[in-house]
Image (cartoon, rainbow, N blue to C red):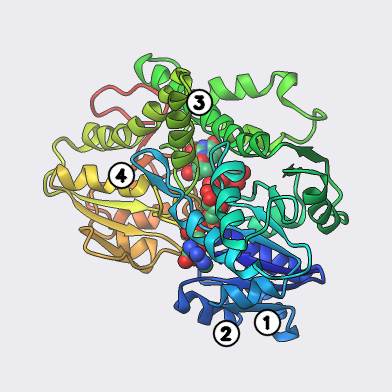
Amino acid sequence: MQIAVIGAGYVGLVTGACFARLGHRVSCVDSNPGRVSVIRSGRAPFYEPGLDVIIRDGIESGALLATTETMQAVSESDITFIAVGTPSSGGACDLRQLGGAAEQVGAAVRGADRYHTVVVKSTVVPGTTDTLVRSILERTSAKSAGELGLCMNPEFLREGCAVRDFMHPDRIVIGQLDDGSGAALAQLYAAFDCPKLTTTLRSAELIKYASNAVLATLISFSNQIAEICEAVPGTDIDTVLRGVHLDRRWSCDGERQPEILSYLRAGCGFGGSCLPKDVQALRAFAREHGTIPELLEAVDSINCRRPARLVRLAEQALGPLAGRVITLLGLAFKPDSDDLRHSPALAIADLLLREAAVVRAYDPVVTTLDGNRGITTYDCAADALVGADAAIIVTAWPEFRELDWSSVSTSMRCPVIVDGRNLLSEASLPPQVRYYRIGRAYHERDSK
Ligand code: NAD
Ligand code: UGA
């Protein structure tokens, strides 16, 4: 099939490169010429394991094209995915990029005599596809929906394992305006061996929000229990949640733990480009529709409190933080990603800077920071820790577990580790280290 994808970000580029890998001809369109030229050179414009190689193969074989020309890409295609950003604006879902892309797609199919299917892949609040997108497409294409196929196909991939998630999805949701609309999409996904759910456009849109909201809820639930442990001496979050995980209703076959349990863990909060904005957008949408989203509000506020917990632990270990040198281990919102959007690391850094601490950071893939954030970045963890008063582990990169803590801790001014992911809770640390982890109560100058 000939496919156009509008927006070559995480979702659009992974979608395009994977469909090209599966034998389709794909044009990835992005309005950012810099991004397009990186893709044309056979590389991904962001860090995503496994993506470079399928882009390079696609570009070399000619199955994958990158362009800024929407008109040509869409008019030569049978199906167009819209995968532009839907960021948060004042807590609501900002649909301006989507509206702009729909205008261009409609104009490109105007006058075309073959049936074309437009698929919204961006995360959008329920009703967006069958009102905003539909009306823009009908106006700009001079065709009625029906003459033009219209679908909503939410994407569930995770950054860091996006290619695997796309190629081996757990489910495919096809929201369709009518059967004709869904047919091309069903054909495109025919080779994927997973449950497929065909539904209305609005249910497909809400499935996406509900899916992200339940993940965020599990994380905030775990962090709420961690807060209780932090207030009650003699309790420990890791043990408490291990006890919860052992309920056989959380397990698939008794041997392998289901992946969902990785969200039933305490930490320094969820971040990234989607969970925070999608919870907020769903809250705003629920209110607009006269419902009271108190659970989502709690999920959000528990999450916003987590960075402060780590700063309090550093204070507990060191006293006032003014002038103290604190090294953040990890900047990305999660391992295997270089995405800093809503990363808890940045919130922690801001709180530390407000206390007049000196903030350093090391991340295996985020090596520089745009703008003057007041954070000095380093190329290796050991260098970032020389002379530091404390290390705060923010991102659960496995290399922090492998660090030679015996040698590193002797180079620190104070060998204090504050572990925001409880990454080292099972590690044997040298005796001089004062180790503070989340989800347990500490008295003054008390550590592991
Ligand atoms: P992104 O910001 O990384 O990429 C969006 C791209 O669209 C940008 O490169 C931008 O230049 C381009 N763009 C905007 N308007 C355009 C236009 N008119 N024509 C051509 N290009 C245009 O966004 P993303 O992270 O890929 O997310 C896209 C959508 O998918 C969002 O709705 C997001 O919520 C959803 N989503 C994201 C993820 C994820 O892991 N990032 C996962 C599932 C769903
Ligand atoms: C998430 C969803 O998992 C995807 O299904 C969805 O497609 C995507 O959002 C999206 O809509 O963009 P992603 O943000 O890439 O994917 O990453 P996750 O692995 O889900 O992690 C999200 C955040 O939760 C990270 O900040 C992570 O550190 C945090 N997290 C995760 C915790 O704090 N605790 C956990 O136990 C698990």
* Of pointers 2 and 4, the one earlier in the residue sequence: 2
**Number of marks in the image?**
4
* Of pointers 3 and 1, the one earlier in the residue sequence: 1
Marks 4/3: CA distance?
20 Å
* Of pointers 3 and 2, the one earlier in the residue sequence: 2
Which secondary structure lies at badge 1? helix
Label 4 amino acid? Ala
* Of pointers 1 and 4, the one earlier in the residue sequence: 1
Tell me the residue at 71%/75% (across/down).
76
Q: Give the image location of residue 231, x and y in percent.
A: 35, 16
Pointer 1 residue:
59
Label 3 amino acid? Ser
Tell me the residue at 27%/54% (across/down).
412
Which secondary structure lies at badge 2? loop
- Ligand 2 within 8 Å of disc 3? The answer is yes
Q: Is residue 298 above or below residue 325?
A: above
- Foreground: disc 1 or disc 4: 1
Q: Which mark is residue 41?
A: 2
* Residue 438 placement, left or right of 318: right
* Of pointers 4 and 3, the one earlier in the residue sequence: 3
Label 1 amino acid? Ile
Q: Is residue 184 above or below residue 111?
A: above
Discs 1, 4 touching: Cβ within 8 Å: no
- Foreground: disc 2 or disc 4: 2
